[in-house]
Structure formats: C-alpha cells, structure tokens
Image (tube, rainbow, N blue to C red):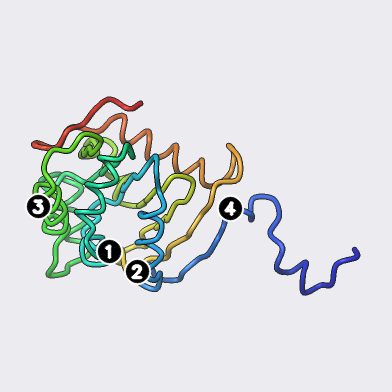
Amino acid sequence: MLWPKAVRDRLKTGGDRELVQSYAYRSACPSTVWADLIAGATEDLFFAGFTSYFLWTQVPALPEMLRRKAESGCRVRFLLGDPDGAVTRQREAIEDVALTVSTRVKMTLEQLAKIGEVQGLEARFSASADAMNHVSLSVFRFDDDALVTPHLARLVGHDSPLMHLRRHGDVGMFSRFAEHVEELWTGGVPVPGVPSAAPR
C-alpha cells in the first residue's frame, strides 16, 4: 500500500514472475536474445523446436558455439520432427509454403552433421505418437531460461508468438514446459549419426 501505483504495476507477483518478455511474433525477438541465452548456458541447452532451422541463420557461428558448449560439459540436445513422418506431411499441407517442414528439419540435420559427433551433443526425432504435440509447441531451454512458441493454426513458427520465461521455483510455467519436452525426449528415437544418450 505504501508503493506508488506505477511501481506496483511494474512489479511481477505469483506466476507472472516467470514471464520476462513476450513477443507477438517469434521473429520480433532480437537475435541477440537467442545468442546471449545460448552463450550464457553452462549446463543444459535443449532445442525442442520441430525444425529449429532458423537458429542457424539467426545466431552467428552457432555450430562452433555448440561444439564449445558440449566440450565444456554443457548438455546440448536437439529434439526434431521426423522429416518423413505423417505429421510432417500434414503440417506441410497446412502451411503450404515453399520452404517445407521436412526441408527445414533437413537443414538442421545438415548443420548437426557438420558439427560431427561430440560428447554431450545429442539429437532425437520425436516419436510418431508425440509428433502432433511437438509440432504445435516449440520449447527452447537455456539452463533456467526458456523461449516458448505455441504455433497458431496455419502460421509458420516465425509468425507465431513467443514467451521468454525464467524459472522461479519448481511449479511455475517454466517447469510445466520443461517437463513437457522432457517427456517428448524420453519417448524420442535416435537421429542417425548423432549420439542419443539416455536422459540423465
């Protein structure tokens, strides 16, 4: 009651504390946010976008950065959609764009192949039974930060909204999304040529 209204309006409480920033479009999130979050992570980098293709053009020198992260002990994971899966084909028909879903997945696979096998770098395809849950929600984790994109109707990822979350405890929004993609990861299948160790 002692604080001015302007201060109270800026103070986040309860579940709202975990929301750092929101963007009406994923493409509105500055590339520096992605680069800084990746650079700052020391334990867990988890890229659980269905394609994650945009990362390779948005973050400078990403392959080298990921290699260094993995070699320094940071766990680096990619959970991708199966480029030959039924849900991938369905999504391609829905989006109806030249840069198809399967092509975007293959762009990420190509970049991972260039990095090669590095201890700590893992990749899986989401299981066919989980693919619909995966394609509708992208979660990117950087230790205790996450960027989350719920995919809207017929829109491609960069036209869907994005939330930047930061963990404040074990029962907030961050943990809910983190648990979601960990479940998808557990049921995932190995990507040929990239290690896929059991979850730690």
Check disc 1 and give the amino acid type: Val
Residue 18 has which mark? 4
In three-dimensional space, the C-alpha distance between marks 4 and 3, rounded to whole angstroms, equals 34 Å
Which numbered disc flags the more N-terminal residue, 4 or 1?
Answer: 4
Residue 59 has which mark? 1
Q: Are marks 1 and 2 in contact (CB under 8 Å)?
A: yes
Which numbered disc flags the more N-terminal residue, 1 or 2?
Answer: 2
Which numbered disc flags the more N-terminal residue, 1 or 3?
Answer: 1
Q: Are marks 2 and 3 in contact (CB under 8 Å)?
A: no
Residue 31 has which mark? 2
Disc 1 secondary structure class: loop
In three-dimensional space, the C-alpha distance between marks 1 and 2, rounded to whole angstroms, equals 6 Å
Q: Residue at x 22, y 65 (%)?
A: 95
Q: Nearer the viewer, mark 4 or mark 1?
A: 1
Check disc 2 and give the amino acid type: Ser
Q: Residues within 10 Å of mark 1 (few under 14, many from 20)?
A: some
Rendered location of residue 16, percent (x, y):
63, 55
Q: Residues within 10 Å of mark 4 (few under 14, many from 20)?
A: many
- Please tell me how many numbered marks the rendered image carries: 4
In three-dimensional space, the C-alpha distance between marks 2 and 3, rounded to whole angstroms, equals 21 Å
* The one of 112 and 91 positioned closer to us in this rendering: 112
In three-dimensional space, the C-alpha distance between marks 4 and 2, rounded to whole angstroms, equals 21 Å
Check disc 4 and give the amino acid type: Glu
Rendered location of residue 30, percent (x, y):
39, 71
In three-dimensional space, the C-alpha distance between marks 4 and 1, rounded to whole angstroms, equals 24 Å
Q: Nearer the viewer, mark 4 or mark 2?
A: 2
**Disc 3: which residue:** 110
Q: Residues within 10 Å of mark 3 (few under 14, many from 20)?
A: few
Which numbered disc flags the more N-terminal residue, 2 or 3?
Answer: 2
Disc 2 secondary structure class: helix
